Amino acid sequence: MTPIGLAVLIPFIGACGVVATRKSPLIRNCVLVISGLVNLFLLVYLLLGRENYDSVQVLFETLPGLRIAFHIEPLGLIFALTAGSLWPITSVYAIGYLNAGNDPHQTRFHALFCVAMGSAMGIAFAENLFTLFLFYEILTFSTWPLVTHSRTPKAIAAGRVYLGVLLTTSLILFLLAIVLVGSYGSGLSFIPGGVLSNVSPTLTAVLLLLFLFGIGKAAVMPFHRWLPNAMVAPAPVSALLHAVAVVKAGVFSILKISVYIFGFDALSSLRLNDIMLHDIILWIPAITILLASVIAMRQDDIKARLAYSTVSQLSYIVLGALMANQMGMIGGAIHITMHAFGKITLFFCAGAIIVFSSKNKVSEMNGLGRSMPWTFVAFFIAALSIAGLPPTGGVWSKWYLALATLETGQFGLLAVLMISSLLNVYYLLSIPLRAFFLPADEPPQALENRASMVAPLTLTAAVSLLLFFIADGLASFIGEIQP
């Protein structure tokens, strides 16, 4: 088994180990964390072995032309490293969170979490659309029980929406797009420059829309409803959905398909008669960015506010993919990492607030920062990153996206990015400011009594600061791609 195959296999082995050691919670939890650390070590090894980028590992061929195969390329490695870095951190947080609530189904939770991470690795390293689709569906089915983990009527209803939206979009739209690419393109493999050089502009536009709406995990409106509904799940699941695997798998898939199936030449020149279809389609994620930001402003439930923030932020990445230029590709790719660390910090903080203070409404958080200083300082740093303000990593991804709009003369889209960032400042930064500077509703008391929950959110907030200084290296790494 090659290292790339092991990177996909280790999470599934970890799931088996979690189940096998279920009678000893301590050993089970060690297996969970160690699996994540081993996987991360292997991903770093793959990063250092750049000479292997052209290698392809074929597991088996189901039918002629349909093979399950993996390869390494910069976009996939960035996504895998982002998810792989957050896996052990989220595992530690989940252990503390579930123990705090005396959850009776921790083994099931941790095992499915491992399967979800294995699915994310399969998506990251997929060599072709068939492999990507297979692991995309495994990810859906492995995370559905996590959404319904509490088994309350509200959670079960949210699970139905989750499964209904994601399966409907993937089996009708996404799968149809793959069949059409296989029929009219030059293959299903991800190839620099794309595989649609002989496809008509009309069919190219249809394929683009099928992928855009068929990859429901990207939460482009109107196929976003599953994401806010899933907020009934425990905070570690929200972190998995919003930062580690699920939504990132969606926007990563759109980015990879834009680069390696369509190619920038086909996207940027997409027109029908005298109508520039490319410029029109760009406004689909742009509208999602604005509408979701406006909706987020009106949410008093902290997790609902963060959920609509995610819907908005995901379309930044989709917009970068559809810009069809190098700046857009770089901005979208590094926003996967910047948003992942920022948003997982916000959800870690939200979970800590709910566990430690039993408050989930923004309007109830007056003065709470005096009782939970670490949590709200971390929230403040992560909010800066999501809003795209220094000294956090989020400023650079939005900077590259802004440059992409200027390069193509899309000044309207530049205005969208600027307005959305201002809205981010309002609905995110107002939370820690309220917690630190408004009078407390009750006398302050120390509430942060679980290091297993406070340490992960402190670490991910620190990484959001660190990313400000290493973003140039990430951009150079992505810039090696010749789309």
Image (tube, rainbow, N blue to C red):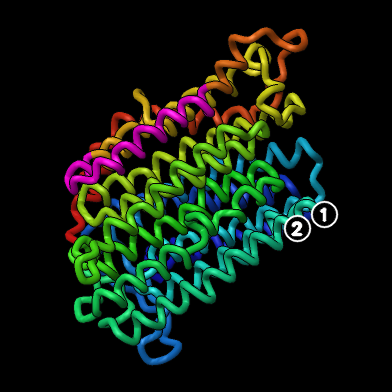
| Magenta part, dominant SS | helix
Circle 1 residues within 10 Å: few <14, some 14–19, many ≥20: few
Q: Is residue 279 above or below residue 344?
A: below
Q: Are marks 2 and 1 in contact (CB under 8 Å)?
A: yes
Residue 240, x across and y down, in percent = 57, 49
Residue furthest out toward the bottom: 64
Query: In what quadrant of the picture does the C terminus appear?
Result: bottom left
Residue 153, disc = 1
Please state the extent of the stretch shown in magenta in the rendering: 403-429
The quarter of the picture where residue 188 lies is bottom left
Residue 355, disc = none
Query: In what quadrant of the picture does the N terminus appear?
Result: bottom left
Residue furthest out toward the front: 274
Secondary structure at badge 1 equals helix
Position of 426 with respect to 178 (left or right) is: right
Foreground residue among 394 and 423: 423
Secondary structure at badge 2 equals helix
Residue positioned 27% across, 51% down in the render = 329
Q: Is residue 16 above or below residue 229?
A: below
Disc 2 from disc 1: Cα separation: 6 Å
- Give the amino acid type for the residue marked by disc 2 in the picture: Ala
Can residue 420 be seen here? The reply is yes
Residue 443, x across and y down, in percent = 76, 8
Foreground residue among 246 and 59: 246
The residue beneath circle 2 is: 157
